[in-house]
Image (tube, grey):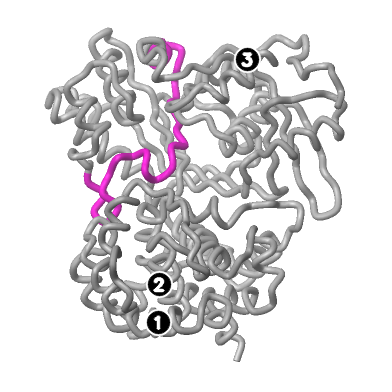
Amino acid sequence: MPVDLLTRGDLPRPRSGIVHLGLGAFFRAFGCVYIADAIAASGGDWGVVGISLRNPATRDALRPQNWAYTSVTLYPEQSEARVIDVLNDVLVAPEDPEAVLAAMTAPEIKIVSLTVTEKGYCHIPSTGALDTDHADIAHDLSNPLPVSAIGFIVRALQRRRDAGSAPFTVLSCDNLPDNGRVVRGVVLEFARLIDPALADWIADHGRFPATMVDRITPATTQDDIARVATLTGHYDAAPVLHEPFAQWVIEDDFIDNARPDLAAAGAEMVTSVTRHENMKLKMLNGTHSALAYTGYLAGKETIADTIADPAFATYARVLWTEIIPAVTPPEGVNLEEYAGALLDRYANPSIRHLTWQIAMDGSQKLPQRLLATLRCNLDNGRASPALCTAVVAWMRYVCGTDEAGNKIDVRDPHAAKLLDLTSGLDDPAHIVRSLLTFDAVFPADLAARLEQPLIAAAREFWAKGAQATVEAFSK
């Protein structure tokens, strides 16, 4: 392996204008690339201060490289590397929350963006309300030095108001329906609990544009690090690898219009992102989750492995026939063509996106990815057997063992609750009924309507197993 370390070049770095909460592989493979291209096209002080909310691993990997890293585009038969150098610092919130608040309070920071996954919003997915029983929220309501993303945003805005500074724009980049509205709602709820006047100030002066983000970005492995070193001739402890496709749709609603020239970088600046967002959440994220649960239980390691099985490719196509009637397309978009492009993206053998990785945090994902479509189809009298199969695959997965009886490490903020609801139950009908009582995922009215179709799907799934159940959609 080459011994020379990747480092930032000699070009002057842009001053920081953005703080990003949750600096994982996705934002470095997506948002930072757009920002780098925007700066290259139009200039501006839009460097990024990254915040790790949980552990120092990303900071520790990037610091010896002076925050530069390699972005690798994985085509089916080749790879293309470039160095991204828009990061100016990475802070670790648990080590020094005061430093994080100081960074967010600095007047030159115009945008605070976040990729904290669905669970990072500390909300109740079925309603969108702030989960005041969440341990992080309970801590942050009574402590000025927070631990949650929502706590950091509110406490930083509180300091800016008290200092007479303008607020920053809050830019959610997570897979949530109307993510701008969701983050605005939980921020205002939190603020009102500590200072009603602060909530009024944020409501009057803050901006929370919604976005749609799309780029498949698998977690980086040690094998990937070695592969990048061979490709580039430099050792990079924190490269990111991703598909060629990227799409960023952003509501153009920023405080004082202060933002990078993201349109020059290829982002779509729009007045409403709702149609793009619903299309992506239901058609991409919905089928991604369905393939993750069914594929994992059938012994498939990655989405590419899953879709290479003709039965699962057919299952994906059947899912889209159930999903498309529930989607209003953005202007100029043909949904059948969009589905075909998604299938091609899933089949890219260079993208090793683990089914187990996508299966994480399902209790936070199901309401927007699958259940919203099921509700729409129920309202319109449309049967949804493939979608019901996806939901019962999740139910089978959260029971904690695979079809061979091996233990599954269920990574979910409600894992203990889910295991408790299914513990000791063998009859799939009893498992379905028990899980449907979990109203953080299944609103009571929807649970009642789903009970019988899910029980029918579950009996088949438990009896046949994932592979045979999916194969039945090809007949």
Specify start and end residues of the magenta stretch as a single range.
103-129
Q: Using the image, determine if residue 193 lies above or below residue 270.
A: above
Neighbourhood count class around disc 2 (C-alpha, 10 Å): few under 14, some 14–19, many 20 upward? many
Residue marked by disc 3: 63
How far from the left and from the top, in percent, is residue 243?
70, 48
Q: Report whether 371 appears left or right of 260.
A: left
5 or 434, nearer to the observer: 434
Residue name at image x 67 percent, y 36 percent: 240
The earlier-in-sequence mark between 3 and 1 is 3
Badge nearest the viewer, 2 or 3: 2
Neighbourhood count class around disc 1 (C-alpha, 10 Å): few under 14, some 14–19, many 20 upward? many
Residue name at image x 47 percent, y 73 percent: 323
Q: Amino acid at mark 2?
A: Val
Q: Is residue 104 magenta?
A: yes
The earlier-in-sequence mark between 2 and 3 is 3
User: Which of the 4 quarters of the picture holds residue 131?
Assistant: top left
